[in-house]
Amino acid sequence: MTKVEKFNAIKELVKDNEAYVAFLDAEIARLENRAAKVNEKRAEKNAEKDVTYREGIEKALADADRPITLAELVAGIDAEDATPGRVAHYAGKLVKEGKVARDKAKVDGRKVTVYALA
């Protein structure tokens, strides 16, 4: 149960007292404004990260003259927090958009996923 839900529940109990209702309404509005600011900052941060990873993946694939594995893709990205999970996530988005092709290939005797520009 969130604070807003708790305040709404309390507001139902004290609905006859205008001072309490006004206070609870102000607290609910304050919490909602704070949540909106946090969500806005998070969206900004994610948009920056999105651009960094997308451009990094496209550049790494353009520089490669062949389809490359996820490990090679991670090594080719200039982001300091690049992990295989994040790179696979953003590469998957690019695959869905049709900018990148994903395929299976044998590398060192194992089947792995390889990526190339579409």
Image (cartoon, grey):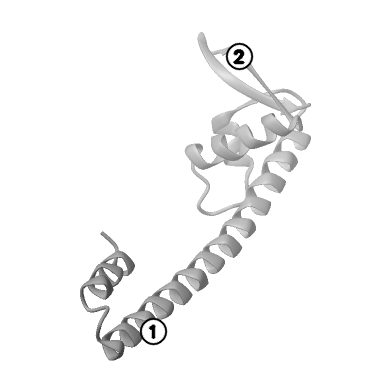
The image quarter in which residue 2 lies:
bottom left
**Residue that lies at the very extreme toward the bottom in this rendered image:** 19
C-alpha distance separating marks 2 and 1 = 57 Å
Amino acid type, mark 1: Ala
Residue 26 numbered tag: 1
Amino acid type, mark 2: Lys
- Rendering coords of residue 10 (x, y %): 23, 73
| Mark sitting earlier along the chain (2/1) | 1
Foreground: 31 or 81?
Answer: 31
- Rendering coords of residue 50 (x, y %): 63, 51
- Rendering coords of residue 82 (x, y %): 53, 47
Q: Is residue 4 above or below residue 23?
A: above
Q: Is residue 16 above or below residue 92?
A: below
- Where the C terminus falls, by quadrant? top right
Q: Badge 2: how crowded within 10 Å, few (<14), some, or many (20+)? A: few
Foreground: 42 or 54?
Answer: 42
Residue at the spot x=76%, y=33% of the render? 99
Residue at the spot x=62%, y=45% of the render? 77
Residue at the spot x=65%, y=26% of the render? 68
Residue 104 numbered tag: 2
The image quarter in which residue 26 lies:
bottom left
Label total for image: 2
